[in-house]
Image (spheres, grey):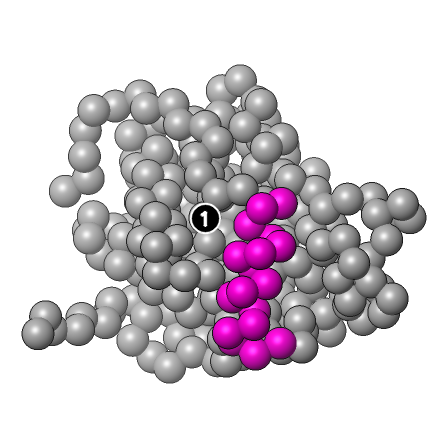
């Protein structure tokens, strides 16, 4: 049996809710950074919300941005230390609602940073309020009758918007709702980081993740709901991939 190796960056027990997708995503990022030898050459900018729980056990360098300002802070890191990897790790409420301007401006400028956005369809940390990614009919603390698109609009698809920007290097959407999706997501994460290493420009990976606590579902029904409802609306795959280098990380 192959030995189970836990990344050094993420060996401490995490404090995310049971069934939450953040723990899986954190591990995939840690494995990728250690694989390419950048575990000590990366600065992680964490957004306000569930993403900040990562700070309680992550062993690498990091900072917390003000709410929604992850991309702006990650840009500052890259300007000050262009020799390092600058990664912003945020939730959908942080990156797409509070910080939509910062997110889009960094992408529009083709800033050479990597942004990971965990989309769990609500403001999870602050009580489960409706986000711009909340599904039609989804019940939240601020949409107790279910989201009505006629009144609040339909869920926003930021990766699709960003992929239309001319100079952006890489945009993808992955998920953690099953093993196949997780394996594919790891490839997207590595490619997004390679984009920055090779000097190709801005990269964004949106990651669909369950939130059983606020969805009021168990782990199994959360994964099933993602498969049946969320993934068809937010399709998985690479939306843009400007491969500017034939190199591989080593």
Residue displayed at 14% across by 42% down = 250
What secondary structure predominates along the stretch shown in magenta?
helix
Chain part drawn in magenta = 217-233
The N terminus - image quarter: bottom left
Image position, residue 56 (x, y; %): 45, 76
Where 17 falls versus 203 (above or below)? below
Nearest the camera: 226 or 123? 226
Where 103 falls versus 130 (above or below)? above
Helix, strand or loop at disc 1? strand
Does 232 appear in magenta?
yes
Does 135 appear in magenta?
no
Q: Dot 1 corresponds to which residue?
A: 174
Where 17 falls versus 131 (above or below)? below
Image position, residue 82 (x, y; %): 37, 37
Image position, residue 180 (x, y; %): 34, 55
User: Could you say which quadrant of the image residue 199 lies in?
Assistant: top left
Nearest the camera: 97 or 120? 120
Task: State the residue lying farthest toward the left.
Answer: 1
Residue displayed at 38% across by 39% down = 192
Residue displayed at 72% across by 46% down = 155
In the image, is 217 to the left or to the right of 184? Answer: right
């Amino acid at each position: 049996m192959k030995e189970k190796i836990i990344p050094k960056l993420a060996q401490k027990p995490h404090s995310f809710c049971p069934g939450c997708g953040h723990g899986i995503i954190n591990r995939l990022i840690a494995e990728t950074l250690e694989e390419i030898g950048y575990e000590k050459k990366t600065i992680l900018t964490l957004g306000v919300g569930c993403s900040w729980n990562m700070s309680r056990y992550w062993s690498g360098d990091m900072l917390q941005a003000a709410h929604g300002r992850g991309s702006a802070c990650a840009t500052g890191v890259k300007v000050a230390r262009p020799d390092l990897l600058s990664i912003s790790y945020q939730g959908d409420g942080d990156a797409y609602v509070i910080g939509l301007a910062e997110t889009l401006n960094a992408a529009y400028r083709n800033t050479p940073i990597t942004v990971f956005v965990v989309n769990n369809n609500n403001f999870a940390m602050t009580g489960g309020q409706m986000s711009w990614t909340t599904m039609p009919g989804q019940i939240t603390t601020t949409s107790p009758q279910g989201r009505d698109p006629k009144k609040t609009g339909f869920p926003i698809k930021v990766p699709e918007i960003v992929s239309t920007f001319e100079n952006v290097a890489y945009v993808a959407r992955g998920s953690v709702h099953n093993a196949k999706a997780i394996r594919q997501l790891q490839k997207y994460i590595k490619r997004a980081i390679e984009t920055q290493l090779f000097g190709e420009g801005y990269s964004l990976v949106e990651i669909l993740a369950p939130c059983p606590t606020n969805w009021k579902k168990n782990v199994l029904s959360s994964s099933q709901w993602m498969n049946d409802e969320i993934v068809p609306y937010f399709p998985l795959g690479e939306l843009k991939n400007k491969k500017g280098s034939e190199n591989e990380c080593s």
